Image (cartoon, rainbow, N blue to C red):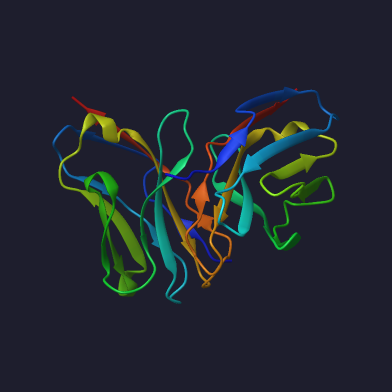
C-alpha cells in the first residue's frame, strides 16, 4: 500500500532558526503533494501544494517545500521560525489526478522555543 | 474567504447510540469527504461523495456508517451504533470537480463512553 512517512513526531527549534520538517512517500509515480497545518483546537489548513510545474513551492506564512522525485521527498522548510509557527504539520499525498482520497503522514508537532 | 464548517465541535455519546455529524462544504464544491483521526494516529480517509452517491470508501467505512446530502448545503456522516473505538476527530472536506486540493473543516471531536 502507498504510504507517507514523516520523520520525527516532534521537532523543536529556537525562534529565528531554520525549520525543516521531513516527508517521504512510498511510490515513484509522480504524486500530488500537500502540507497542511493544524493549530491547537483548529482544523486542517492548507499550507502549500505541489500538483505540477515548478518543484519549489511557496506557501503561506513563509513556508516552502521542494518536490524531489529522485528522493521521493517533499520536505517543508522555513528560514526563520516564529513562535506562531508552533502547530502540528501534516504531509498528505494523492497518487491520482482529480478528486481522490488523500493519504496522510502521522504528523509532526513543531515547538518553537523563545 | 469561503470555508468548510462543521457542527457540533464536540459530541459525547454513549456506546450504542446513533450520532450524526454535520458539515457545510464550500458552496461551489461538488466533491465531499469524511476523514477521521484517532488520538495519536494518522488522519484516515473514510468516504468520498459526488452527485449524491458514494464515489469511494475505505475499509473503515463499514455498514455502521452512512453519508447523506439531505439538502443543498449540508453533508452528514451518521454512525448508527457507536463503539468505543469510534472516538476520534472527524474532519469533513470538500473540493472542486477535477481538483486534487481538498479544503478541510475544523473537525468534530467525538467521544464514545
Taking depth in this image into account, of B18 and A88 the one nearest to the observer is B18
Residue B60: x %, y % from top left: 72, 51
Taking depth in this image into account, of A71 and A42 the one nearest to the observer is A42
Residue A77: x %, y % from top left: 24, 51
* Rendered position, B77 above or below A42: below
Q: Which residue lies at the image location 42% right of the left edge and 75% below the top edge?
A: A30
Q: Is residue B82 left or right of residue A39?
A: right
Residue A52: x %, y % from top left: 36, 73
Dividing the picture into quadrants, the one containing residue A107 is top left
Q: Is residue A96 left or right of residue A51?
A: right
Q: Which residue lies at the image location 30% right of the left edge and 74% below the top edge?
A: A53
Q: Which residue lies at the image location 30% right of the left edge and 57% below the top edge?
A: A75
Image quarter in which the C terminus of chain A is found: top left
Taking depth in this image into account, of B41 and A97 the one nearest to the observer is A97
Q: Is residue B41 left or right of residue B110?
A: left
Dividing the picture into quadrants, the one containing residue A69 is bottom left
Image quarter in which the N terminus of chain A is found: bottom right
Q: Which residue lies at the image location 44% right of the left edge and 70% below the top edge?
A: A31
* Rendered position, A90 above or below B101: above
* Rendered position, A112 above or below B49: above
Amino acid at each position: 500500500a502507498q504510504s507517507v512517512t514523516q520523520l520525527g513526531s516532534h521537532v523543536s527549534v529556537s525562534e529565528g532558526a531554520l525549520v525543516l520538517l521531513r516527508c517521504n512517500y512510498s511510490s515513484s509515480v509522480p504524486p500530488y503533494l500537500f502540507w497542511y497545518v493544524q493549530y491547537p483546537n483548529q482544523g486542517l489548513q492548507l499550507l502549500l501544494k505541489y500538483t505540477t510545474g515548478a518543484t519549489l513551492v511557496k506557501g503561506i506564512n513563509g513556508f516552502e517545500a521542494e518536490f524531489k522525485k529522485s528522493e521521493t521527498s517533499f520536505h517543508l522548510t522555513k528560514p526563520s521560525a516564529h513562535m506562531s509557527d508552533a502547530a502540528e504539520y501534516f504531509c498528505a499525498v494523492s497518487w491520482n489526478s482529480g478528486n481522490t482520497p488523500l493519504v496522510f503522514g502521522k504528523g509532526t508537532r513543531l515547538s518553537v522555543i523563545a | 474567504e469561503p470555508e468548510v464548517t462543521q457542527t457540533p465541535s464536540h459530541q459525547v455519546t454513549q456506546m450504542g447510540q446513533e450520532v450524526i455529524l454535520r458539515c457545510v462544504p464550500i458552496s461551489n464544491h461538488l466533491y465531499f469527504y469524511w476523514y477521521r483521526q484517532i488520538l495519536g494516529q494518522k488522519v484516515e480517509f473514510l468516504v468520498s461523495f459526488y452527485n449524491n452517491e458514494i464515489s469511494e470508501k475505505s475499509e473503515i467505512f463499514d455498514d455502521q456508517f452512512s453519508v447523506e446530502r439531505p439538502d443543498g448545503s449540508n453533508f452528514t456522516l451518521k454512525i448508527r451504533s457507536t463503539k468505543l473505538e469510534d472516538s476520534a476527530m472527524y474532519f469533513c472536506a470538500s473540493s472542486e470537480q477535477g481538483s486534487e486540493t481538498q479544503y478541510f473543516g475544523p473537525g468534530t471531536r467525538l467521544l464514545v463512553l
